[in-house]
Amino acid sequence: MFASNPTVITFVIYILLMVAIGLLAYRSTRNLSDYILGGRRLGSVVTALSAGASDMSGWLLMGLPGAIYLSGLSEAWIAVGLIAGAYLNWRLVAGRLRVQTEHHGDALTLPDYLARRFDDHSGLLRVISALVILVFFTLYCASGVVAGAWLFETIFGLPYSTAIWAGAAATVAYTFIGGFLAVSWTDTVQATLVLFALILTPIIVVLATGGVDTTFLAIESVSPEHFNVLKGATFVGVISLLGWGLGYFGQPHILTRFMAADSAKSIVKARRISMTRMILCLLGTIAVGFFGFAWYAAVGADAGVTLANPEHVFIEMAKLLFNPWVAGVLLSAIMAAVMSTLSTQLLVCSSALTEDIYKVFLRKQAGAQELVWVGRAMVLLVACAAIGIAADPANRVLGLVSYAWAGFGAAFGPVVLLSVLWKGMTRNGALAGIVVGAVTVLVWKQFALLGLYEIIPGFLFATLSIVLVSRMDGRPEGDMVKRFEAAETAYQADC
């Protein structure tokens, strides 16, 4: 039955294509730098599309459309915050981080950069950073596994317990084989596919509903509050949604894309490409949820079609409104969004375990090939942990993403931002910022204090901790300041 289903055929061809790219990248992977950073040779287009694809996971085609479907345009404040945060991240951090990592011992990972930037010879900063990455990325990876499982469950009719393994296997395969180059090359393909899906789908939905006027009338007749951007809004609620933008400064899977660019000059062009794509994607995903509500309210209701899970709105409309071959392409776009982010997250976790723990503390003399294979083994280890968390089918994609996003944004955001802008920051200040940011998110999330998204107090308290502790430490050592100033001078010269 599957062999004659155009949707399944298209979907399987896409998966096989991604694995083939992984095999091609395998031939270019010679050492750990190639495996986890691609040898720092990504051009501006690949950097832009890869950063965007690794950022926007299953939540783009499932989580956010589901939220818009349920609550209307009041959930669109998330998009406003994300656009602002992403732009500032490209503008303030991207180029500087690329140059700073090179001037600080050619650091390959975020923990490696922080340890070298602040001359932390104790290894404490490196270990704490790696542990934070492992904790929150395992949650983040679980969100991708959930989205992939729902997709495989829908397409192949598999039980959820089987679908989580099948969905994860597709991503793990090319990440395990090809490492960073495979992830970056496939991200370029996947970013294009996702953009195509998010432009095409809302247009077809509007046409199927009877045009723009009919679509709006359908929404107004069922739920006029869907148009209200302040529906049920409070000051805390709006600030919480806008606060998502703070997360960009601390996302390791996005920051590694900046580190892997071939030069700071490439960042300028990459920023323009990435921001243009991001705005189009977010407008598309809002339109999918908003117009999808209209379709189910008007056409779907008459046809007896219901939607049990709002986060499935894109999946169900792709199946109902499109030719089976086109539906296969659109469903592949969901898999593209899942694979692009999940693969990057697995790789960052792998690099933290391999470069920052195994190589530094367990096998300092490990050879290049040994480290690459240890990195591959770590990919499998983290993937299994994420699958374990995702085993509960009651998990929601956006809920898992929001927790992990807040954890990284608060723990690393202020540290990374200030590390590239302020030469007076110290090692103890960085350590205090990471610990305070991570602990604040964990505690705030547990008790849901004030109804405020935990990234906001986490980011604020972490920033204050960095500044206060750094001021108490006094001026950093001369060599640390000289390296920082040399890197900043090089950045200004390049840009």
Image (cartoon, rainbow, N blue to C red):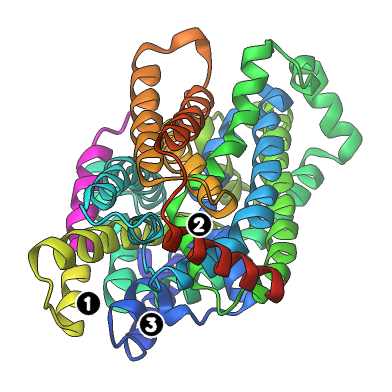
Q: Position of residue 427 (x, y in %)?
A: 36, 46
Label located before the other in sequence (3 or 2): 3
- Which numbered marker is on residue 20? 3
> Which picture quadrant has residue 324?
bottom right
Q: Is residue 54 above or below residue 320?
A: below
Separation of disc 1 and disc 3 at Cα?
A: 19 Å
Mark 1 — residue?
372
Residue closest to the eye, 253 or 100: 100
Residue closest to the eye, 233 or 422: 422
Label located before the other in sequence (1 or 3): 3
Q: Is residue 95 part of the magenta span, yes or no?
A: no
Query: Which amino acid does the dot numbered 1 rest on?
Result: Val
Residue extent of the magenta highlight = 377-395
Residue closest to the eye, 208 or 146: 146
The furthest residue to the right: 213
Q: Position of residue 415 (x, y in %)?
A: 47, 44
State the count of labels: 3
The residue drawn where x is 62% and y is 14% is 236
Mark 2 — residue?
254
Q: Secondary structure at mark 1?
A: helix
User: What quarter of the picture does the C terminus occupy?
Assistant: bottom right
Dot 3: few (<14), some (14–19), or many (≥20) neighbours within 10 Å?
some
The residue drawn where x is 51% and y is 38% is 312
The residue drawn where x is 66% and y is 75% is 266
Q: Is residue 326 visible?
A: no
Query: Which amino acid does the dot numbered 3 rest on?
Result: Ala
Q: Secondary structure at mark 2?
A: helix
Query: Which amino acid does the dot numbered 2 rest on?
Result: Ile
